[in-house]
Image (spheres, rainbow, N blue to C red):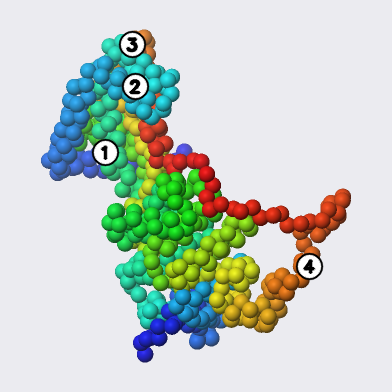
Amino acid sequence: MFPDGWHYNVAPYINSFVKWLVVAWGPFFEAISNLVLGMLLQIEAVLKGVPWWAGIIIITWIAWRQTHNLLKTVLPGLLIFTIGMFGLWEVAVETLGIVIVAVLISLLIGLPMGIAMSSSERFNAVNTPILDAMQTMPSLVYLIPALMLFGLGKVPGVFATVIYALPPVVRLTNLGIRQVSWDVQEAALAFGASRWQMMKEVRFPLAMPTIMAGINQTTMMALSMVVIASMIGAGGLGEEVLKATNRVDVGKGFEAGWAIVVLAIVIDRISQAAAKRWEPPQR
Amino acid sequence: MIETDQDRLLKVKGLWKVFGRNPINFDPQDTDSMESLRDDGAVLAVKDVSFEVKRGEVFVIMGLSGSGKSTLIRCIPRLVDPNWGEININGRNVLDMDEKELLEFRRYETAMVFQHYGLLPHCDVARNVAFGLKLRGVTPRDRQDRARQAIARVGLEGWEHHYPSQLSGGMRQRVGIARALVQETDILLMDEPFSGLDPLIRREMQETLIRLQKEVNKTIIFVTHDLSEAARLGDRMAVMRQGEFVQQGTPEEVINNPADEYVERFVFDERQILSGNKKRPPFGPTQKTRFKKSTPITPAPAPLAAAGRR
C-alpha cells in the first residue's frame, strides 16, 4: 500500500481558507447575495404575475412564430398544461426563475470568458482544466462552500447552478470563434477592421450559431442542476422531487420529474428555433 | 527625396518575405544571416522583388501556385508583413506605418478582391458591399446610397437583399468587386479573383472588369496563374517563380520574348492561339482512344450569359 509516512492532507487548509473567506469577505458575499436575490425576486414576481392561461398562450404563440408547424405549436402548450394539472405550476415558475437568473449570470461570465479564450492561447490553456474540473467535480462538493458563503436558500442554489452550467457556453463560444473562416477574417482585415470591429462585425456574428448551441446546453444543464440545488433550500421542482424521494412516493416523484422534463423540452425547442435565426439562409 | 512623381503610384523596392522559425534577424545584405536561414529550412516566399506601377495601370503578377504571388500581393496592405524592403504608395512607405496608420491606409487607400470572396455569410449583398464603409464609420444612409450605386455598377440590381449563399460563384465575386469599388480607393488589389469560376463566367467577369476599368480607371494589381487572363487584362505583367520576378514587361513582350525556359513553357499555349494556329498542344479531348467514333470536337456555342439569373 501507499507508505503511511507520506500521507498528507490539504483538507485542513481548504477548510480554514473557506472559514477565513466567510469571516473576512462576509460583507462582500452578502452584497453579491443581495444583488442576486433582488434579481431573482424581480424575475419571479414577473413570472408569477402571468396567469397560467396567459403563460400557455405566450408559449404557444412563440412556438408558432418559431416553427410554423401545427403539431410543434400545440404540443408545448399541452405539455405545460400537464404541469398545472399536477398542481406544480407555482413551483415550476420558481424553478424557471432560478434557471433564468443562473443562465443570465452564466452568459455574463461565459461569453467574455469564451471570447478571451479564443484570442489568447495562454488563457485558453489555463482555463480548459478549470472548466473540466467544474464539469466533473461532484456538485455536492461545492454546494457546501456555496452554502457557507451565501447562506441557505435560492442564492447558493443559483451559484452552484452557475458553476455547473457555465462550461458549455464558454467552450462553445471559444470553439465557435476559433472556427470562423480565415477567408472572411482576412477580407475584413484588408478593409481595415480593427480588433474590436473584427470581433463585433465578423468573428462574433459568424460564431453565433455555435454560441447559441452553447447557450442551449447551458440552459439544459442549469435545469438538471435544479434538483440538486434544492438540497440547500433552493426550492422549486427539485424540492418536490426531494420530498417525494424522502417519502418513497414514486408517483409524486414522477410528477415532479415529468414537470422538469417538460420545462426542458419546451425551453430546448424554443431556444433551438431561436438559434436557427442566426444561421445564414440556405439556398 | 520625397516622391512627387504622380505617375508612379506604387513603388516596391527590394521586397523580401521569409517564412520560417526565426526570420526576425533577417538582412539580405548579410550573407551570414542568409546562410543561417537556409540551414533553418526557412522558405523565401518573396525574394528581392521590385516593381513600379503607374496610376491607372493594370499590373498583372503571374505565376504557378506556390510561386509567392499571393504572398506578394498580401504584402502591400501588410496582411503578410514583409521582412525587408520598401513599399511606397503616394510617397509613404507602408512598412514604416504604425498600427493606426496602417488601419487608415487599409480603409482609405487600398481595396482587395479575394479568390474565395470572403463575404460575410450573415449579411445580405447590400450590407456586404457597404462593409468597408461601415468600418470607416460612414453613416448608414450614406452607406446604403453608395452601396446601391456600386451594386448597379457590377450588374446586381435587384439582388441587394439576397445572401451570399443564395448566389452563384460569379455573382459572389461581383459582390466582392462592388465591395472594393465602393471604397473609391486609388489602388485595387485582386488576388486570383476569377480562378474559382468556370471558363465562361470567368470570361464574362474579365469583360466586366475591363468595362469597369474604363469607367473608374483604377490602379490594379492583379494576381493570376492564367496567361491568357494576364494578356487580356494587363497593361504590364510580371512572371514570378519561387519568389522571384523572372520577367517584367507588357504581355506582348513576355509572349514574344520569353526570358527563359520557364516563361517559355507558360507562353507556348498562348502563342499558338495568338498566332492563329488553332492546333492545341496534346491534352484533353485529343486523346481519341477514349472515343469510339472520332466525332469532330467543336467548341460549344457560348450562350449569352445574362448578368443575373432569375
Residue at the disc numbered 3: A252
Q: Give whichever of discs 1 and 2 has the lower sequence position.
A: 2
Query: Label 2: how many residues lie within 10 Å, few (<14), some (14-19) or many (20+)?
Result: many
Instruction: Residue B57: tell me if it is visible.
Output: yes
**Image-quadrant location for residue A254:** top left
Question: Which label was assigned to residue A60?
Answer: 2
Q: Is residue A64 left or right of residue B19?
A: left
Chain of the residue that carries numbered disc 4 in the rendered image = B
**For numbered disc 2, what is the local secondary structure?**
helix
The chain under label 2 reads: A
Q: Residue at x 39, y 44 (%)?
A: A208
Q: CA distance from mark 3 to mark 2?
A: 27 Å
Evaluate whether label 4 is on the same chain as label 3.
Answer: no
The mark nearer the N terminus, 3 or 2, is: 2
Name the residue at the bottom extreme.
B1
A9 vs A246, nearest the viewer: A246
Cα distance in 3D space between marks 1 and 4? 73 Å
Q: Are marks 1 and 4 on the same chain?
A: no
Are the residues under badges 1 and 3 in a single subunit? Answer: yes
In-image side of B47 versus A261 (left or right): right
> SS at mark 3?
helix
Where is residue A92? Give x, y as percent: 28, 20
How far is disc 2 from disc 4 in space, using C-alphas?
A: 71 Å
